[in-house]
Amino acid sequence: MAEQRRPQRLDQPREPRRLTLPRFDPEAFGRWSEGIARGMGTANFIVYMTVVIAAWFVWNTLAPANLRFDPYTFTFLTLILSLQASYAAPLILLAQNRQADRDRVALEEDRRRASMQKADTEYLTREIAALRNAMGEVATRDFLRSELARLAEELDEANQRRSRLERRQQERPAQRGGDGLDEPRDDLDGDYSRGGRPEGREG
């Protein structure tokens, strides 16, 4: 069943008719315009255009009158050059706008990367400062060597004192068994003073 046509209401305005234009791909057109602008900005284009204009002048000046298609004042050439200029300017402007958009995107990307690198650098700087502060409280190799050397010296001195004490203790029985008198007294006993009298019993 065919769809019934909606009746037009008098309390609503008519919908304007939209002119449908041919659609095209802006990206493809932009690449095409950039190619034209890139070609027009080369030395080859200037040389070729100069050769064509010179040939145009020579032909329409020196050729027979019935073969000249654009006689003097060269109106047709002027029209062609004006048409070329009128199209070249927008194409070049479009190419410049696309290049400006790319430059802006590249600039934003560079700015983002620069900010990330700055944040990373600041983080690494803080980490290095924290490690430096922590290393100030950790024993270094030179400090450990000096402490081990001092401990070895103290152990050697203690070993020497112990060996002297053992030697004196071995000498005491020999002296005691020889004369039967009192055992020799020295500073290690601590019971007698250097004068031979008991400490605290003087007088």
Image: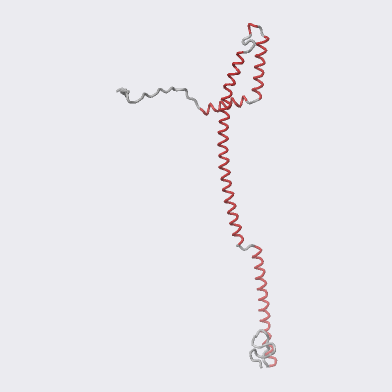
The mark tally for this picture is: 0
Which residue is drawn at the image coordinates 65% and 22% (left, top)? 46
Q: Quadrant of the N terminus?
A: top left
Image-quadrant location for residue 99: top right
List the single residue furthest toward the left: 1
In the rendering, at what x and y percent does residue 108 appear? Answer: 56, 39
List the single residue furthest toward the front: 11
Which residue is drawn at the image coordinates 66% and 63% (left, top)? 142
In the rendering, at what x and y percent does residue 109 appear? Answer: 56, 40
Image-quadrant location for residue 138: bottom right
Seen from the viewer's position, the closer of residues 67 and 90 is 90
Seen from the viewer's position, the closer of residues 179 and 118 is 118
In the rendering, at what x and y percent does residue 61 appear? Answer: 67, 10
In this rendering, position of residue 133 left or right of residue 6: right
Q: Is residue 92 above or below residue 79?
A: below
Q: Quadrant of the C terminus?
A: bottom right
Q: Is residue 68 above or below residue 178?
A: above
Q: Is residue 172 above or below residue 6?
A: below
Q: How is the image coloured?
A: secondary structure
In this rendering, position of residue 31 left or right of residue 174: left
List the single residue furthest toward the top: 66
Image-quadrant location for residue 20: top left
Q: Is residue 106 above or below residue 135?
A: above
In the rendering, at what x and y percent does residue 163 appear? Answer: 67, 79
